Amino acid sequence: MSDLPVVRQRRILEWLRESRSLEIEALAQRLGVSAMTIHRDLNHLMREHPVVKVRGGVVLMETNHDAPSCDLCAAAVSPRTAMIIHGTDEQILNACCPHCGLLLLEDISSPTLVLARDFLYGRMVNAQQASFVLASEVALCCAPSVLCFATFEDAARFQRGFGGEALDFSTVWAQIKDRHRSHYHLHP
C-alpha cells in the first residue's frame, strides 16, 4: 500500500485529527511501510503542522492560534515551559509549566501521556521519563520553579550552574504535592 509520501502524510494527519496520538509501529503496519518511512513522514509533518514525535509515537498538539491557557492557574501557556496531559477519557489538560502540570496530575486518575518541553532543547519529551530541576535560580513561571530536562545529566549540569535540586519525575511530583499541601495547610 506504499503510496506517495504526500498521500501517506495526509492520511497520518487525518488519523491524528481523529485520535490525537498514534503509535509509529501501528502507522507502519496500517500503511504497509517501514517504521523509518513513518519517521521521515513525521519529520516532514512536524515542519508544517502542530505534530510532535514522542518515543514510539506521534501527538497532534493544540491547533488554536491563540496560546492556550493553563488549566490550573489560567496563565498563557508558553511554548518554552509547556506541559500537556492526556487523560484516558480523551481529556487534554494544558499547563504553563511543569509545576502546574504536576499539580494537575492529581485530577487525572490514569494519564495516557504526559508531555513536557525540555528546557534546553525545546523538544517535547515524556515527562514520566524526564528529569527536573526544582527551585533553581531561573524562575520563568510559577513558584517554586520546575524545569524539565530530557536526561538526568542535563538536569544535573543545569543544577550545578543555577542551583535547585535535580530530581526524577516521581520525586519532583511528590515534593510539589507536599509543598502545595503545606502551603495551603491541606491534609493528604
Image: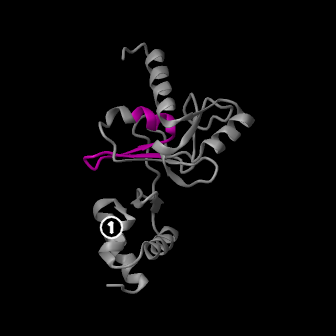
**Amino acid type indicated by mark 1:** Ala
Magenta-colored span: 83-104
Picture quadrant of residue 6: bottom left
Mark 1 sits on what residue? 26
**Front in this rendered view, residue 80 or 15:** 15
SS for callout 1: helix
Above or below — where is 18 with respect to 98?
below
* Residue at (34, 47) in percent of width and height: 112
Please state, as top left, top right, bottom left or bottom right, where the N terminus lies in the image: bottom left
Q: Could one spot residue 73 in this view of the protein? A: no
Please state, as top left, top right, bottom left or bottom right, where the C terminus lies in the image: top left
Q: Position of residue 82 (x, y in %)?
A: 50, 46
* Residue at (30, 68) in percent of width and height: 15
* 93 magenta-colored: yes
**Front in this rendered view, residue 129 or 142:** 129
Above or below — where is 131 with respect to 118?
above
Q: Position of residue 178 (x, y in %)?
A: 46, 21
* Residue at (38, 36) in percent of width and height: 105
Q: Quick one: label 1, few (<14), some, or many (20+) residues within 10 Å?
A: some
Using residue 5 as the reference point, say whether residue 87 is left or right of it.
Answer: left
Q: Position of residue 87 (x, y in %)?
A: 31, 45
Q: Position of residue 120 (x, y in %)?
A: 64, 49
Picture quadrant of residue 63: bottom left
**Front in this rendered view, residue 35 or 140:** 35
* 75 magenta-colored: no
Above or below — where is 56 with respect to 113?
below
